[in-house]
Image (cartoon, rainbow, N blue to C red):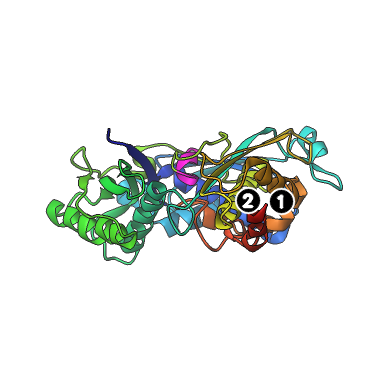
């Protein structure tokens, strides 16, 4: 029986991702001036209208509208022909301060969780980044396509793009690409054959070869026939709606909480990052080939209610040893996670595109504990 698995990603010009970037740019701007800022920022955009809302308590002085226009311009929404422009966008700012009921649970010498919820972290050995293949390829397709669009190489392309990658896992030790789908917004006056040929040869094939995979896959490009009306003109955008593309492409579970626009007292973000950090180090140490970790928290409480993991029978030590590792080598308290991963620093805009995981420039992607954890192989 054939076995397939599919993941998708979206570009920085996708309306939901546009909102994520603005939310995280606002978070970073607050943290730059006040590392103890409490931020829960949501952005909504449709056509040429945007609302920036949420709860922000900070000493920082931030021009939210100016940040939004800067992101719009950076992404490429500067063309009034498509009715979406950083110059003409109507922007409403509706920001409140954090609820005192939440604040009293978070404030104090030991930080309490800013909300209840469940979070997951995942790692496996499919790629050198310890990420599942399908989402890694999908993200790489979007990153390369956007890069080529911005430098002018990818003619006629506009900011809004999506990718979808289906892998054939029939031979689980040697997966291959079955289908690659890309939907790319384009200028109405374009050469369709040249456009699609470029996507196959200079984006799809390049990424497949980068991962040492086949290039004889099935290809779907703009399957409706054309994709001229895109971005907020074609679809409403909202912060936090691409949570599967942000994480593991559906390969692992997701607790349901979005990341973007939230400071690290919100465990939706910090605990998901720390669970990824723990999972990656456990796999890098050789204790398991795959692991998924679940955490749960109660609002106002500093430590998790529960820790659960599953190695999918890929573990090289027994489960008691792995639980011992989690309990003794990692600090899942809110303050512990924030301090160890330096989550009061303004690094979050970089997470808002092409996934929050699998990038080597974040603290939660470091494998600095792997050598220490390797000693548990002897137990």
Check disc 2 and report the residue beneath it: 278
How crowded pointer 2 is (Cα within 10 Å; few <14, some 14-19, many 20+) is rated as: many
Q: Residue at x 38, y 47 (%)?
A: 134
Check disc 1 and report the residue beneath it: 330
SS for dot 1: loop
Separation of residues labelled 2 and 1 (CA atoms): 7 Å
Is residue 292 shown left or right of residue 167?
right
- Residue extending farthest to the front is 378
Q: Which mark is residue 88?
A: none
- In the rendered image, residue 376, in percent from the top left (x then y), is placed at 66, 54
SS for dot 2: helix
Quadrant assignment for the N terminus: top left
The boundaries of the magenta stretch are 241-248
The answer to if 247 sits in the magenta stretch is: yes
Total labels: the figure holds: 2
In the rendered image, is residue 346 in sight? no
Is residue 201 shown left or right of residue 263?
left
- In the rendered image, residue 68, in percent from the top left (x then y), is placed at 52, 52
Query: Is 87 in front, or is 115?
Result: 115
Q: Tell me if label 2 and label 1 are in contact, CB under 8 Å.
A: yes
How crowded pointer 1 is (Cα within 10 Å; few <14, some 14-19, many 20+) is rated as: some
Q: Residue at x 68, y 61 (%)?
A: 372
231 w.r.t. 196: above or below: above
- In the rendered image, residue 361, in percent from the top left (x then y), is placed at 55, 63
Upstream in sequence: badge 2 or badge 1? 2
């Amino acid at each position: 029986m054939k076995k397939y698995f599919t993941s998708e990603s979206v570009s920085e010009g996708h309306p939901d991702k546009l909102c994520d970037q603005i939310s995280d740019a606002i978070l970073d701007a607050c943290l730059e001036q006040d590392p103890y800022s409490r931020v829960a920022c949501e952005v909504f955009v449709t056509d040429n209208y945007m609302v920036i809302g949420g709860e922000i308590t900070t000493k920082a002085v931030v021009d939210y509208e100016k940040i939004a226009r800067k992101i719009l311009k950076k992404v490429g929404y500067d063309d009034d022909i498509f009715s979406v422009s950083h110059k003409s966008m109507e922007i409403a700012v509706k920001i409140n301060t954090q609820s005192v009921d939440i604040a009293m649970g978070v404030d104090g010498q030991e930080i309490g969780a800013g909300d209840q919820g469940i979070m997951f972290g995942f790692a496996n050995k499919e790629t050198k980044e310890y990420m599942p293949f399908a989402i890694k390829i999908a993200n790489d397709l979007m990153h390369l396509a956007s890069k080529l669009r911005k430098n002018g190489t990818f003619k006629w392309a506009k900011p809004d793009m999506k990718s979808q990658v289906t892998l054939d896992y029939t031979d689980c030790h040697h997966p291959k690409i079955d289908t690659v789908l890309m939907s790319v917004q384009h200028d109405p006056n374009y050469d369709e054959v040249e456009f699609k040929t470029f996507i196959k040869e200079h984006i799809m094939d390049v990424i497949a070869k980068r991962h040492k995979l086949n290039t004889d896959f099935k290809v779907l490009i703009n399957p409706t026939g054309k994709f001229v009306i895109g971005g907020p003109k074609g679809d409403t955008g909202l912060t936090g709606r691409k949570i599967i593309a942000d994480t593991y492409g559906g390969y692992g579970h997701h607790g349901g909480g979005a990341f973007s626009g939230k400071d690290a007292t919100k465990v939706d973000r910090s605990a998901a990052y720390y669970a990824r950090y723990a999972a990656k180090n456990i796999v890098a140490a050789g204790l398991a080939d795959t692991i998924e970790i679940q955490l749960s928290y109660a609002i106002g409480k500093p430590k998790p209610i529960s820790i659960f993991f599953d190695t999918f029978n890929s573990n090289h030590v027994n489960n008691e040893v792995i639980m011992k590792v989690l309990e003794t080598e990692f600090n899942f308290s809110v303050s512990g996670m924030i301090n160890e991963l330096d989550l009061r620093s303004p690094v979050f805009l970089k997470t808002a595109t092409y996934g929050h995981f699998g990038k080597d420039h974040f603290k939660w992607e470091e494998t600095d504990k792997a050598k220490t954890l390797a000693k548990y192989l002897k137990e």
